[in-house]
Image: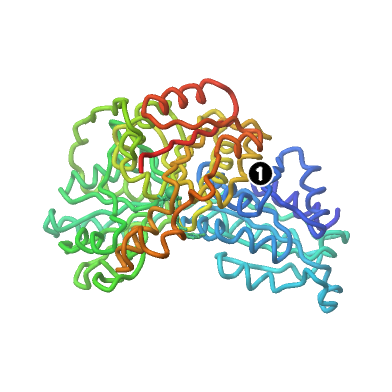
Amino acid sequence: VTGAEALARTAVAGGIDMVFTNPGTTETHLVAAFEAEPGVRQVLCLFEGVCTGAADGYGRIAGKPAVALMHMGPGLANGLANLHNARRGGAPLVAVVGDHARSHRNVDAPLTSDIASLAGAMSDWVRTTGAPDEVSRDMAAAIAVAQRGAVATLVVPTDCQWSTVDAPIVSIPPWTCGFYEHRVAETAEALQAATPSRAALLIGGRLDEATLRAADRVAHAVGCRLLVDRAPQFQVGSVDVPAPERLEFPSDLLAQQLAALDLLVLAGAELPKAFFATTHSPNHPVQPDTRVQLLAEPEDDVLGALQALVEVLGGPEPDPSSREPVTPPTGALTRESLAAVVGSTQPSGALVVDEAITSGFPYRRLLDRCPPHTWVPVTGGAIGFGLPAAIGVALAAPERTVLALVGDGSAMYTIQALWTQARLGLEVTTIICSNRRYAILAGEYQKAGFGDSQSSAAHLFELQRPELRWPELSASMGVPGTSVNTAEGLRAALMRALEEPGPHLIEAQLVP
Ligand SMILES: Cc1ncc(C[n+]2csc(CCOP(=O)(O)OP(=O)(O)O)c2C)c(N)n1
Ligand SMILES: [Mg+2]
């Protein structure tokens, strides 16, 4: 076999079945090798940020890595922002990047660059294959790293792809994780000793129903608060699934939220930190005298650790409680009515990708009153995630409907993801939250003391001149699009989109 074939076979042996790619000349052999593997699907994305965002979404929902296959330094550079999101969220992802043949490196040909340096900034692990016989071993190592919830980038020179290799294919078994018993015992002791109202359990990562219920039982057993990460990999929600208090986004509110804690237990979540520095709030919102107790790290078996903790703490199963479902509103389309329309119309089992930025605030408060769904937020703060991620989550769960709530500014970063959605006929409905501006930045600008939206820099935060014509933009890439400006209109358009097969786009024109 060639090195490229060895890489593709190693991928299959390691459980990989999806490749999101925008290839170039140095990936030709890899593309051919993946295509020859019946168990692998290659998906063409028209920008590398779509490849990496789709691979992030796929990895979160499939629970195993996809490959993002990109062209040399420039291709990887285009994909970095969403690679960053994947890394910050702990999503499993293998990036494969072709490079010049080893003999061609010193030629300093036009596409030559320091790929490993670029990759290092936004990967947990980087390797450049040194010889054809090392391709399979290196790919297996990349998969092993990625499976734990990490971004692994492998750079493969073309001569390592086209040369014949003798080394055997290395097979990586699926990752099985565990947890530390001693941390369970320490956590139980700490929780039992703490004043309940001054203790909290913070959860994050992959928040399926079992994990939320186990965490809720712990909180009930000792009477402590239950907190959840601002942006977990995903979080299941419905009227009867526990809905923990979410960490605040504004740095000052976050500090207030965590101020009165003697004990903070971490289960699959990182230590909370301020999103941005401000002049008046701490960078580290957890007080220095708060005891931080680690129950399980994100790559551990968080559910197993929580269940073990429930065993130790005992206590009855919390009474089943159910909240009022959202009801559909009428009238003007505000971000509140948008939230209520979506929350009352989304089908049971939907995957909801959330890059709605400021337009999503009310919807995020309604998640615990929506039909059963999985919420998939941006994890690393880099926009351009939503439309690509919708491709990945749709391919990871083809039987489920995908809704993508995306800010108009964010959508323009990776709008060409629509073309891939159309080509694959994915069941994705994108709702563009059209406030015709970068609302969050206009707000930050004002908060920083540079005046209101009438000030000189206002043109940098508005998207009206010229106006973005979403239905036309969408139709040009094969996705039927429509614009609505009332709550009733949005509900009708959403119901139509959900009935018809294939992807749709709805521009929700919000009142100014
Ligand atoms: C890759 C990247 N570039 C720039 C930013 C800065 N940024 C944060 S939000 C935002 C605008 C978001 O606009 P939109 O999606 O319309 O949401 P809105 O603020 O209107 O709610 C920008 C440019 C970022 N977070 N990531
Ligand atoms: Mg906007």
Q: Quadrant of the C terminus?
A: top left
Mark 1 belongs to which amino acid?
Met
Instruction: Please state the total of marks drawn on the protein image.
Output: 1
187 or 430, nearer to the observer? 430
Instruction: Let me know if residue 125 appears in the view.
Output: yes
Expressed as whole percent of the image width and height from the top left, the position of residue 270 reads 37, 61
Expressed as whole percent of the image width and height from the top left, the position of residue 10 reads 72, 52
Residue 275 appears left or right of 78: left
| Picture quadrant where residue 262 is located | bottom left
Residue 320 appears left or right of 136: left
Expressed as whole percent of the image width and height from the top left, the position of residue 368 reads 30, 36
Residue wearing tag 1: 18
Q: Residues within 10 Å of mark 1 (few under 14, many from 20)?
A: many
| Picture quadrant where residue 239 is located | top left
Residue 425 appears left or right of 233: right
The residue lying at 46 percent from left, 42 percent from top is: 353
Q: Measured along the vertical axis of the image, is residue 155 above or below residue 486?
A: below
Q: Measured along the vertical axis of the image, is residue 209 above or below residue 282?
A: above
165 or 92, nearer to the observer? 92
446 or 150, nearer to the observer? 446
Dot 1: what SS?
A: strand
Expressed as whole percent of the image width and height from the top left, the position of residue 415 reads 59, 46
Instruction: Let me know if residue 233 appears in the view.
Output: no
Residue 286 appears left or right of 176: left
The residue lying at 30 percent from left, 35 percent from top is: 241
The answer to whether the beta carbon of the residue marked 1 is less than 8 Å from any atom of ligand 1 is no
